């Protein structure tokens, strides 16, 4: 059968923990503001470990969890907006470091929704019957693109990686997956690249940073999170009460609380780890899934919904049975 079964998960965060108190020293903010407006208390910021290093550690743990050797993997997809290099991609670096054959390996960019997009691609590629075992990763070192003098963004973003191993098997773990995009021509959330040359001989040293209109992204996120859950339920025929857990992208605790309220879903069944990790973009969902599993919040056979949203604008979600 060409079904997609999830057989392993893993995650990794850099050792260096940065508390809100650090930001009180570098920008005009307070621990109280950050906690009450975002839910964040600590985050992990990489020192000398790049995105592929975090992705490698998460992948090793996921393969270990799946009891599968890297030689059996024939597809790697890495979702990231913060690769080590524009080229080669993180997935191609991983292919060599993990010791996989000369398999299919590519990166995708759908910002914070990247892992959901990568999961959809892997699900459909495994479903084609041409691939056997996929490694899907969300990994970021957002600290590379964070302006630590901008209080609107620097307190939010952080570094992490999460990975999942999927195999062509008997059971369809991914019940339904949806992805959407609506081009952000207004620039509500942008990570710039290098500017085009006015004069090609001029050396410009402008660094690309994340810039965000927090209010607009907040409005967008509070709309699409419950909307996507309702869309997934309508497409599958599941009831809200069938869900053992909702794992939303960890962008702001208030966005998660708002979704619980408008859906009338028990707040205790909304997974939250933003207090420890901040917003880790494409890594946020796979990190949360792996943690929820390891904490015993998700067991084999249980059903959960996951939803992500972010720059692009992009959003999407899935209903998954572990
Ligand atoms: N400390 C203190 N004050 C701050 C800080 C800070 N760190 N950041 C902003 N403020 C100030 C603002 O300057 C503003 O001051 P002003 O009124 O004098 O202009 C005031 O706080 C209120 O600003 P708001 O933007 O209205 O604050 P809000 O309560 O909305 O919280 C936040 C801001 C946390 C950014 C919120 O809007 C948010 O979470 N937005 C969504 C972010 C998100 O979900 N991103 C996801 C996608 S990420 C991705 O794809 C990579």
Image (spheres, helix red, strand yellow):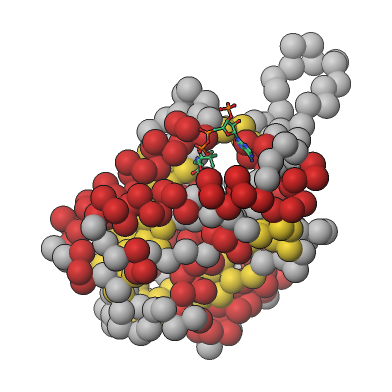
Residue that appears at 78% across and 26% down: 206
Where residue 142 appears, as percent x and y from the top left, is 66, 48
**Which residue is at 30% across, 73% downward?**
244
Quarter of image, ligand 1: top right
Which of 258/146 is in front? Answer: 258
Residue nearest the observer in this picture, 216 or 175: 216
Drawn side of residue 46 relative to residue 184, left or right: right
Quadrant for the N terminus, please.
bottom left
Toward which corner of the image does residue 300 lie, by quadrant? Answer: bottom left
**Where does residue 289 sit, x and y in percent of width and height?**
46, 70
Most foreground residue, 168 or 120: 120
The residue located at (46%, 79%) in the rendering is: 293
The percent position of residue 207, horizontal first and vertical second, equals: 76, 32
Q: Is residue 8 visible?
A: no
Image side of residue 132 versus residue 39, left or right: left
Position above or below: 24 against 136 = above
Residue 163 picture quarter = bottom right
Q: Residue at x 23, y 58 (%)?
A: 264
């Amino acid at each position: 059968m060409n079904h997609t079964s999830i057989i392993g998960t893993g995650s990794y965060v850099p050792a260096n923990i940065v508390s809100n108190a650090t930001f009180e020293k570098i920008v005009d903010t307070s621990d109280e503001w950050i906690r009450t407006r975002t839910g964040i208390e600590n985050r992990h910021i990489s020192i000398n470990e790049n995105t592929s290093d975090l992705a490698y550690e998460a992948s090793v743990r996921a393969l270990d969890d799946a009891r599968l050797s890297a030689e059996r993997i024939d597809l790697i997809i890495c979702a990231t907006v913060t690769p080590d290099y524009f080229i080669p991609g993180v997935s191609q670096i991983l292919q060599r470091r993990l010791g996989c054959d000369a398999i299919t390996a590519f990166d995708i960019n759908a910002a914070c929704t990247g892992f959901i997009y990568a999961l959809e691609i892997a699900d459909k590629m495994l479903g084609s019957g041409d691939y056997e075992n996929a490694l899907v990763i969300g990994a970021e070192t957002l600290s590379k693109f964070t302006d630590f003098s901008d209080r609107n963004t620097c307190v939010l973003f952080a570094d992490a990686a999460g990975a999942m191993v999927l195999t062509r098997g008997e059971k369809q773990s991914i019940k339904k997956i949806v992805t959407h995009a609506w081009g952000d021509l207004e620039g509500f959330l942008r990570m710039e690249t290098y500017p085009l040359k006015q004069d090609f001989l001029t050396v410009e040293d402008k660094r690309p940073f994340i810039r965000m209109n927090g209010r607009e992204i907040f409005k967008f996120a509070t709309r699409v999170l419950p909307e996507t859950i309702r869309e997934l339920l309508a497409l599958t025929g599941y009831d809200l009460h069938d869900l053992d857990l909702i794992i939303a992208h960890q962008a702001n605790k208030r966005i998660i609380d708002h979704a619980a309220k408008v859906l009338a879903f028990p707040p205790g069944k909304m997974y939250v780890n933003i207090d420890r990790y901040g917003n880790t973009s494409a890594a946020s969902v796979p990190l949360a899934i792996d943690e929820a599993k390891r904490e015993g919040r998700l067991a084999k056979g249980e059903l959960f919904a996951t939803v992500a949203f972010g720059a692009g604008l992009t959003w999407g979600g899935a209903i998954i049975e572990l």
